[in-house]
Every structure is written in C-alpha cells, then in structure tokens.
Image (cartoon, rainbow, N blue to C red):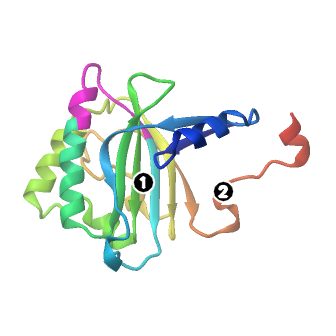
C-alpha cells in the first residue's frame, strides 16, 4: 500500500514512517498554494468538501503551472474565506503530473472558487489552466455531502475543450467514504 502525505510532517515522522514496511509513504512538498490555520474563528461552517486530483502538465510548463497556481491561490486566500487550502505538488511517479488538493469549508466556498463575475480571478485561472495537458484525463477523489452534484464532475474553468475527468466520489461521512476496507486475509497478501 502507498500513502501520499501532503505537508505537516517532520523529518522524525518521515524516518519513523520508513520503519513501517507495510506502507510506502510518499511525502509531497508543495510547489505552490496555501493551507489556512484557524484564521481566528473566521472559517465558515461546513459540511466540507475535499478534492484530491492528479493532473498532467504540458511539457516544459511545470514552473509556469506553479507560478500561475500561486497567483490563483493568493486570490482564493484573499477573497474566499471558505477555501481552507489549495496546493500542487509533483507526482513522484510521473514527471509531468501534479497532485492538486483543494479543501473547502462548504459548498458555497466551492462555488466561489470559480466566480465568473470576478474578472481578475477568471483571467488568472485561465492562465493557470492553460498549463494543463487537457488531452489527458485528470483523476482523483472528491469527498462531498452530495457527490452526485454535476458541478463537481466537470471543468470549473473551461467548457470547451473540457478535459476528460475520472473522479471517484464519496459521500462525506458515509460508511463507505474510505472505500472498501481489506479483510485480514487481503492485508496479508
């Protein structure tokens, strides 16, 4: 089994994790983005939405992607209190792919992260999104109170050409949220 870890670890934790041979830990260092702290109680009420995706980047565009994602992240952080975090990090197995994380306090924050009435945000998102290879699918998981909401399953930046999307959705808090749990025999295999 492999576990992707996104920030907040110490070298000691990384060393201890290496001693657990049943799991491969992949520690990601963010290329761009932010994660909010408590923000003095200013975080809106939930329920939250979480998105973990893997997206391919056009050849030679990784640095531009990081720079433009930071621009978008700075706008999100300043304008949308309910965006708790956004980050991109390099995929350890694919040099041309990133892991893209989004953490939202609630559905309203998700909708505001692509506010088309905000010209500066819309323009910055266009510059950022232009670095993705939209001929290749992006894949990942969404954890949401209503994972069947169609707005969660299409590009929030462009409608044409929309990238192929391969997202697995989970109802936040549902027993099956973590997917199938292996039995003792499956764990031994």
In the rendered image of this protein, does residue 178 appear above or below residue 32? below
Q: In this view, does 185 lie to the left or right of 162?
A: right
Q: Is residue 116 magenta?
A: no
In the rendered image of this protein, does residue 119 appear above or below residue 60? below
Please identify the residue farthest to the front as the structure is shown. 12
Residue for badge 1: 153
In the rendered image of this protein, does residue 183 appear above or below residue 79? above
Q: Is residue 55 magenta?
A: yes
Between marks 1 and 2 in the image, the one whose residue lies nearer the viewer: 2
The image shows residue 92 at horizontal and vertical percentages of 49, 27
Q: What element carries label 1?
A: helix
Determine whether label 1 and label 2 are within 8 Å by CB.
no
Please identify the residue farthest to the right as the structure is shown. 185
First-in-chain label (1 vs 2): 1
The image shows residue 103 at horizontal and vertical percentages of 41, 59
Residue for badge 2: 178
Seen at 32% across and 76% down, the residue is 40
Which quarter of the figure has residue 151? bottom left
Seen at 8% across and 57% down, the residue is 119
Residue 125 visible somewhere in the drawing: no
Q: Is residue 24 left or right of residue 78?
A: right
């Amino acid at each position: 089994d492999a576990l992707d870890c996104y920030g907040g670890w110490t070298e000691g934790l990384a060393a201890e994790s290496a001693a657990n041979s049943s799991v491969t830990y992949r520690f990601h260092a963010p290329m761009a983005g932010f994660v909010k702290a408590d923000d003095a109680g200013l975080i809106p009420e939930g329920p939250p939405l979480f998105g973990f995706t893997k997206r391919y980047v056009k050849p030679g565009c990784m640095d531009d992607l990081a720079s433009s994602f930071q621009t978008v992240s700075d706008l999100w952080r300043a304008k949308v209190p309910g965006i708790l975090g956004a980050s991109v990090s390099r995929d350890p197995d694919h040099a041309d792919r990133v892991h893209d994380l989004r953490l939202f306090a609630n559905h309203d924050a998700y909708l505001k992260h692509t506010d088309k009435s905000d010209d500066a945000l819309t323009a910055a998102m266009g510059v950022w999104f232009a670095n993705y290879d939209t001929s290749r699918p992006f894949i990942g998981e969404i954890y949401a109170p209503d994972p069947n909401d169609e707005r969660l399953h299409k590009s929030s930046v462009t409608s044409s050409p929309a990238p192929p999307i391969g997202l697995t959705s989970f109802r936040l808090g549902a027993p099956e949220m973590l997917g199938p749990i292996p039995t003792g025999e499956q764990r031994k295999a």
